[in-house]
Each structure stands twice: as structure tokens, then as C-alpha cells.
Image (spheres, rainbow, N blue to C red):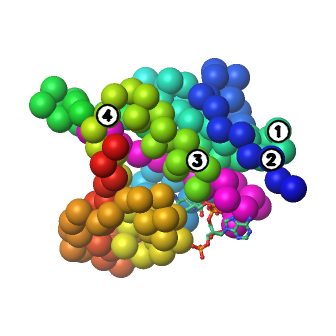
Amino acid sequence: MTDIRIRPAVAGDDDALLALDTISWDSSSGFPSFREKHRETFFDERTTPETIVVAELDGVVTGYSRLVPKTPIPENSHVLGIFGLAVHPDARGKGVGEALVRGTIERAREKGAHKLALHVFSVNDGARRLYERCGFRVEAVLRDELLVDGEYVDDVLMAVFL
Ligand SMILES: CC(C)(COP(=O)(O)OP(=O)(O)OC[C@H]1O[C@@H](n2cnc3c(N)ncnc32)[C@H](O)[C@@H]1OP(=O)(O)O)[C@@H](O)C(=O)NCCC(=O)NCCS
């Protein structure tokens, strides 16, 4: 049986999260411009341990989500966003993603958010199914919003009310 644990990140997770993030994204899920950027650390000014929810599978850091305000606008402060979510390729299909999303929803609730939003590439079918399973619904589709490896991709905006 697999043991999945969801917990807040700590500074000591940096190496594991950097390694995980480096191999977890491809053209159907992430921005090439970000993937190709050389990084020495996972955490930075915008991605602090306080913004990260970690998933451990059998005691090993296997996934993370990044929970931040959707915008810096005070009138929008009741809306948080999942801006970053990844599970190690070798650990997919075991429920880690779902546990992470559900754990992140819970954390957003604890923070008093009214709504949790996210963006997902239209071609990222697996992630879209995962978000639907966890209660997210499509709010808008921005057509041809991104140009990824020479192909136009729609940006799908999803949200769940807390
Ligand atoms: C999207 C992503 C986070 C999903 O993570 P995951 O851990 O594989 O998610 P889950 O295991 O909860 O669900 C994946 C599938 O496994 C199935 N599954 C879950 N637990 C299972 C189990 N114990 N046994 C068999 N199948 C299982 C789910 O039903 C789901 O099936 P589906 O794809 O047919 O809908 C992961 O693929 C990833 O990191 N992708 C790259 C980054 C990315 O796309 N991030 C989102 C950007 S918006």
C-alpha cells in the first residue's frame, strides 16, 4: 500500500524540489522559457517555503503545489491560485496529484480564501481531469493565448469555490 503524506514545505526541501521540478514539465504542461532557465535553488523571493505544499510518497518528496494570491490587488485578495503543481514522473498514477490538490484546497480554506483559481494548458488532459475530479470547473478559455514550441495553445482558467 502506498503512503501519501501532505505537509507544508520547509527550507530543507529545496534540493529535492529543484530536482523534481527540473524533470516534471514538458511542452504539454509548462513554459519552455521557464524550464530552460538555469536555477541554483527552487525557493526564491516569490516561491518561499510558505507558498509550497509538499507531497511525500513512502517518505520521499514526490510532488508539490504552489499556493499564492492570484494577484496583488486587495479587492482580489479573497482569490488564491495554484500556480505550480507537479508530481515526479515515476510516481504518477498513484493518487499523489489528487492528494496534493485536495490538500491545497484545504490549505486555501484554512487561509480564509473564498475561491481557488488556476490556469492549465488546453492540451494538458491529465491535469484537467485531475482538477475536475477535485471540484474545479472551467471559467474561461483564452484561445491561442500561448505559443509553445511553435504551436498555439489555449489557456484554460479553472476555479473552485471554497
Ligand atoms: C498532472 C499531474 C500533477 C498528475 O499527478 P498524478 O500524481 O499522476 O495524479 P493522480 O495519480 O492523482 O491521477 C492521475 C491518474 O491516475 C489515476 N489514479 C490515481 N490513483 C490511482 C491508483 N491508486 N491506481 C491507479 N490509478 C490511479 C487517476 O484516476 C488519474 O487517471 P486519469 O489520468 O485517467 O484521470 C502530473 O501528471 C504532473 O506532474 N504533470 C506535469 C506537470 C503538470 O502538468 N502540472 C499541472 C500544470 S497546470
Q: Residue at x 37, y 73 (%)?
A: 122
Residue 93: say if magenta.
yes
In-front residue for pair 156/131: 131
Task: Give the mark nearest the N terminus, 1 or 4.
Answer: 1
Label 2 or label 1, whichever lies nearer to me, is: 2
Q: Callout 2 environment at 10 Å: few (<14), some (14 to 19), or many (20+)?
A: few
The image position of residue 24, as x and y in percent, is 62, 56
Q: Callout 3 environment at 10 Å: few (<14), some (14 to 19), or many (20+)?
A: many
Q: Residue at x 70, y 23 (%)?
A: 12
Residue 59, disc = 1
Which residue carries the number 2 mark?
3
Q: Residue at x 43, y 28 (%)?
A: 110
Q: Residue at x 50, y 24 (%)?
A: 50
Tag 3: amino acid: Leu
The answer to whether mark 2 and mark 1 are in CB contact below 8 A is yes
Where ligand 1 lies, by image quadrant? bottom right
Residue 113, disc = 4
Spatial CA span between label 1 and label 3: 15 Å
Task: Give the mark nearest the N terminus, 4 or 2.
Answer: 2
